[in-house]
Each structure stands twice: as structure tokens, then as C-alpha cells.
Amino acid sequence: MIIDHIKHIGFYEPMAVGITAAWKEIQQMLQEKGELSDGRYELNSVPDGFFKVQHGTTKPLSEGTFESHKQYIDVQILLDGQEEMAWMELADLTEAIPYDAEKDAARWDGERTHHMTISKDIFYIAYPHDGHKAVSHVDEPHVFTKIILKLPV
């Protein structure tokens, strides 16, 4: 798991191939259209890459499961608002729902030992070994807008 400010996103190109070109393409789309609706958007700059736009309100951190992916690296970028995100190494979690290749997701149960607040202009990268539980809060719900960038592993 990597967490950093968006101004440093290009630094991670060697560890997330295509992240720089994808972010430039997303920024251009945001400049041209202002705001993007929820949904999936294909990327011209990254073969097999895409991103989703998500607006919403967080749910209690105690609810739900962690997730992990095998085919894509998750790069989650907070455009507005905030969320709290939990992380655990997959080896420390118990599989709750087996991996579904069509959804590129497995679900995991476990302690929410490591969590932090992710606010506007912060991004995080979740690799296949990272169990992550996004869109959460500990005390009060948060409203957020985020990009979920999917880069092929």
C-alpha cells in the first residue's frame, strides 16, 4: 500500500506503470467536462486500463469486508471530501468470498488494525497483496468524490 499527495503521483510510475499518463488523461477530461458522472471510463493512454468515478457517503468502518484484486492495481484518488480506509496484509485476513475473476475481487474478513483518513488530493495504491476497505468512517459519515483508477498488473 502506498499513500501520498497527488502532486507526487508521477514518482510511482516504476511501481504502477501507466499511472502518469492515466492521471494526465483524467485531468484533461475533468478540465474539459468540469465534473464527471458516476460510472466507468475507458483510458486511451493505458491499454486495458480504465477508471471509475464514485460520489457517495461513507459507511461505518466496522461494517463490510476488505477487498483485494489480482488483475488490476487500484489507485484511489480523492477529488473532494474524505473517507477513512483500512488496510491489512492478505496473510492476516480470512477469505469471506472467494476470488471472482469477472469482478476481479475477493472479499476478506479481519481486524481493522491499520486505518487512516484520506482527504482531498490524497491517493493510495493497493496492490494484489493489499487487503483494503475503502469508503468508511469511524465516527461521523463523510461525503466524497473519488477516482478509482485500474491499472493492469
Image (tube, rainbow, N blue to C red):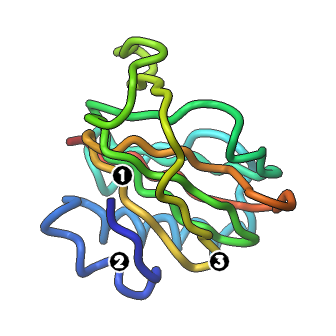
Left or right, 50 with reference to 55: left
Front disc: 2 or 1: 1
Residue at the spot of label 2: 9
Residue type at mark 3: give it: Lys
Residue type at mark 1: give it: Ala
Q: CA distance from mark 1 to mark 3?
A: 18 Å
Name the residue rendered at 26%, 44% in the picture: 47
Work out whether 95 lies above or below 64: above
Residue at the spot of label 3: 120
Residue type at mark 2: give it: Ile
Disc 3: CA contacts within 10 A as few (<14), some (14-19) or many (>=20): some
Name the residue rendered at 41%, 78% in the picture: 4
Q: Where, quadrant-wise, is the N terminus in this rendering?
A: bottom left
Work out whether 116 lies above or below 138: below
Q: CA distance from mark 2 to mark 3?
A: 14 Å
Q: CA distance from mark 2 to mark 1?
A: 14 Å
Name the residue rendered at 49%, 48% in the picture: 51
Q: Are marks 1 and 3 in contact (CB under 8 Å)?
A: no
Name the residue rendered at 31%, 64% in the picture: 19
Could you tell me residue 88's position as x and y percent?
A: 39, 47
Residue at the spot of label 1: 126
Of helix, strand and loop, which one carries label 3? loop
Which badge, 2 or 1, is on the more N-terminal residue? 2
User: Residue 138 occupies which quadrant of the picture?
Assistant: bottom right
Could you tell me residue 60's position as x and y percent?
A: 76, 46
Nearer to me, 65 or 76: 65
